Image (spheres, rainbow, N blue to C red):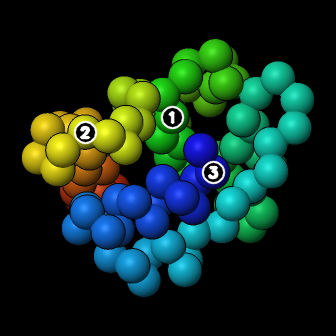
């Protein structure tokens, strides 16, 4: 599924605000990995990559990776706890960043 379709599903289910989708920039990946160095105007250490497939992550960028279970649009709202888990991880990372 295309990233924007997944985000739209999540927005319709109330997991993310619709305005967030307008701010997302889709990066075209080339090659063997999703290389965070392709993202303009940022160092890869400033970026987090949330993905369900470790095989796409460059070995030297695994510290930037947050593993998530495969997205299943057929789960009934409230059954998918992956978003809650990832949100908790992101909030923890933000708290650590703000503390330094």
Is the residue 50 above or below the residue 20 in the image?
A: above
> How many tags in the picture?
3
Q: Residue at x 75, y 37 (%)?
A: 35
Q: Residue at x 26, y 45 (%)?
A: 83
Q: Residue at x 57, y 61 (%)?
A: 4
Q: What kind of element bears circle 3?
A: loop
According to the picture, the residue beneath numbered tag 2 turns out to be 75
Q: What kind of element bears circle 2?
A: loop
- Are the residues flagged by discs 1 and 3 in contact, CB closer than 8 Å? no
- Are the residues flagged by discs 3 and 2 in contact, CB closer than 8 Å? no
Dot in front, 1 or 3: 3
Q: Identify the mark nearer the N-term, 1 or 3.
A: 3
Q: Could you say where residue 52 lies in the image, as x and y percent from the top left?
A: 48, 28
According to the picture, the residue beneath numbered tag 3 turns out to be 2
* Of residues 41 and 80, the one drawn nearer to the viewer in this rendering: 80
Q: What kind of element bears circle 1?
A: strand
Q: Identify the mark nearer the N-term, 3 or 2.
A: 3
Decide: few, some or many residues near mark 3? Use Cα within 10 Å; few <14, some 14-19, many ≥20. few
According to the picture, the residue beneath numbered tag 1 turns out to be 51
Q: Is residue 44 left or right of residue 46?
A: right
């Amino acid at each position: 599924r295309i990233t924007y379709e997944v985000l739209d599903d999540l927005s319709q289910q109330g997991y993310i605000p619709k305005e967030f989708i307008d701010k997302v920039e889709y990066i075209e990946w080339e090659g063997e990995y999703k290389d965070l160095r392709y993202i303009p105007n940022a160092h890869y250490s400033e970026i987090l990559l949330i993905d369900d497939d470790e095989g796409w992550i460059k070995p030297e960028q695994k510290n930037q990776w947050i593993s998530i279970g495969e997205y299943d649009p057929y789960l009934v709202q409230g059954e998918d706890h992956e978003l809650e888990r990832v949100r908790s991880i992101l909030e923890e990372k933000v708290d650590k960043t703000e503390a330094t």
